[in-house]
Image (cartoon, rainbow, N blue to C red):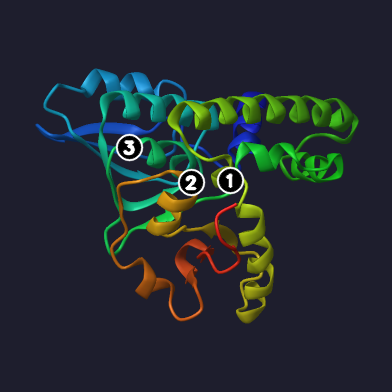
Amino acid sequence: MKRFLWVGVMAGVTALAGAADFSRVDAGSIAMRGAIADGDADRLRQLYTHETTLLRINSDGGEPLAAMQLGRLVRQLRLDLAIDTVCAGSCALYVFPAAYRKHIPADAVLALQESAFLRAQARPAQMRRTLVDAGVAAQDLNRETQALAARLAGVAVQEAAFAAELGIAPAFYRDFRQVAALADVVRQRFPDQDAAVYWWPAAARLQRCYGIAGVEEGARAARLAPDDYLYVPALSALVMGDHALQGCP
């Protein structure tokens, strides 16, 4: 139970479903469905053949370190990636940028959230609130807050190494903070004040500012127009564009 709590806190989600499901679609493609967990890179490796060129994804996030491991394998195998419905959280942070070419169809969404770097910057009071919300008992809060801070710092170090290895600019893992600040204002426009905030960076910004090339983004601009955000009631999600950001850092 404690491991499940830690996984949820580290991944930034309320529930995780064990491991993603991998299945072969045809000779050239493999489908991945679900939250990313330990062992998923091995599952992909087992299905991979020399004919495989494409990974089709539908994932709302998962464990950061497992997603980094999966991303490294995707880069090693030079796989293309296509989002069937959504690639969010750890999927968007670590698996998506690792792919050779990335395709976001007209009805799919790329949705980034807080990176390990930003989570590690949280104040102890914020971490305590997170742990309280996760059900940690009052007498354990001090110890668990210190443990969480150490774990987050460790994952942030791994994230920095991952970015350097794949040639991703550090700003990719830092710019969400500015996007989230603007989202606080945007949320006042509709009743769902608790909508989860995501960021969908444009293909041009991904390449120019972060070194993430090969992105085909379909109808992103039209879907985010006219105010540069997309509200998805069924998911209680507010997906923000790039308006909060200036030029490349």
Name the residue type under label 1. Answer: Ala
* SS state under label 1: helix
**Residue appearing at x 16%, y 29% in the figure:** 52
Q: x, y percentage for residue 113?
A: 56, 50
Whichever of labels 2 and 1 marks the residue nearer the N terminus, that label is 1
* SS state under label 3: loop
Q: x, y percentage for residue 222?
A: 36, 75
**Residue appearing at x 51%, y 32% in the figure:** 163
Q: Find disc 3 in the rendering and name its residue.
A: 99
Q: Nearer the viewer, residue 158 or 41?
A: 158
Q: Mark 2 vs mark 3: give the one in front.
A: 2
Q: Is residue 224 above or below residue 150?
A: below
- The answer to the question of whether label 2 and label 1 lie on touching residues, with beta carbons closer than 8 A, is yes
Q: Mark 3 vs mark 1: give the one in front.
A: 1
Whichever of labels 2 and 3 marks the residue nearer the N terminus, that label is 3
Q: Find disc 2 in the rendering and name its residue.
A: 210
Q: Is residue 217 left or right of residue 169?
A: left
Q: Nearer the viewer, residue 182 or 233?
A: 182
